[in-house]
Amino acid sequence: MARSDSRVPRTRSSASPLRSPLTRRPFGGRAARLAFVVLGALVFLSKAARPCSCVDYSPPIAESVKRADVVFAGEVTKLEVLPSWWADTGDRDAGLLESDPGEPPIRVARVTFAVGKVWKGVREATLVVRTFFDCCICGSRFDIGEAYVVYGYRSPSGDQLWTNICTRTKELRLAAEDLDGLGPPIVDFAARAKAGRQPKR
């Protein structure tokens, strides 16, 4: 049996509903898709570049210490952040979110450190530092069990410590220059703890 062809014949003057009335070119054509990809990339990069324009700049150590409220080295013992599905639930810990009027809230990482050495501003052996967690807003990356040199600053209210990639905060294994420039610590909790574990004679 011959197969019937139900397609509607198209003439040169007939316009497809999938074609632009101005260009008579398919909206899904390669050029259009490329234009959308390029435009989207430019918009994304322009938004991402503005808040993190300091990513290629490392301030001098002396200047960093002067600007910071705290400077210390410590190991991450706890990392708190809302899960990726937080926006779809009603479970929104105010301590793990930051927002401005009219803007969507942004997730915050709350990082607990066991402080080893102190160069400025720290009196406790345990310290909590916050940083932005979501993409492209200059948050520092931390992992549990890893040690870092942290340059932190206090929030306007004074009750929170923050850091970001615009500071010299970095992994301890990458901080040889900082350790040399910072010199001897003013407090050494690690040495105190080690001395406390020494057997008495």
Image: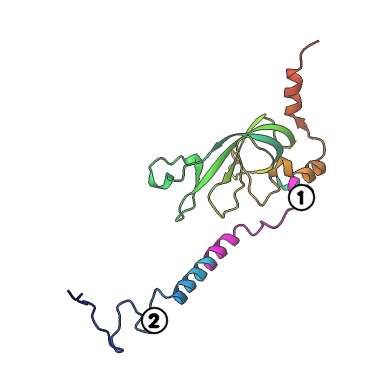
Circle on res. 103:
none
Please name the amino acid that badge 1 sits on: Glu
Assign the N terminus to one quadrant of the image.
bottom left
The one nearer the camera, 180 or 105, is 180
Label 2 crowd bin: few (<14), some (14–19), many (20+), radius 10 Å: some
Whichever of labels 2 and 1 marks the residue nearer the N terminus, that label is 2
Q: Residue at x 50, y 70 (%)?
A: 39
Q: Give the mark toward the camera: 2 or 1.
A: 2
According to the image, label 2 marks what residue? 25
Q: Residue at x 43, y 44 (%)?
A: 86
Vertical comparison of 26 with 140: above or below: below
Residue, far top: 201
Location of residue 101 with respect to 6 vertically, above or below: above
What residue is rendered at 67% in x and 57% in y? 54
Element assignment for label 2: loop
Rendered image quadrant of residue 199: top right
- Magenta-drawn segment: 42-65
Can you tell which quarter of the image residue 122 is in?
top right
Image location (x, y in percent) of residue 4:
19, 76
Query: Is residue 80 left or right of 19 when viewed as pictured?
Result: right
**Please, which residue is most extreme toward the left here?**
1
Spot occupied by residue 72 in the image (x, y as percentages of width and height): 71, 37
Q: Position of residue 156 (x, y in %)?
A: 60, 45
Q: Secondary structure at mark 1?
A: helix
Read off the residue under disc 1: 63
Query: Does the magenta run of residues contain 78?
Result: no
Image x and y of residue 145, in percent: 63, 34
Q: Nearer the viewer, residue 34 or 120?
A: 34
* Residue in the image at 76% along x and 31% along y: 187
Q: Amino acid at mark 2?
A: Arg
Q: Is residue 61 left or right of residue 110?
A: right
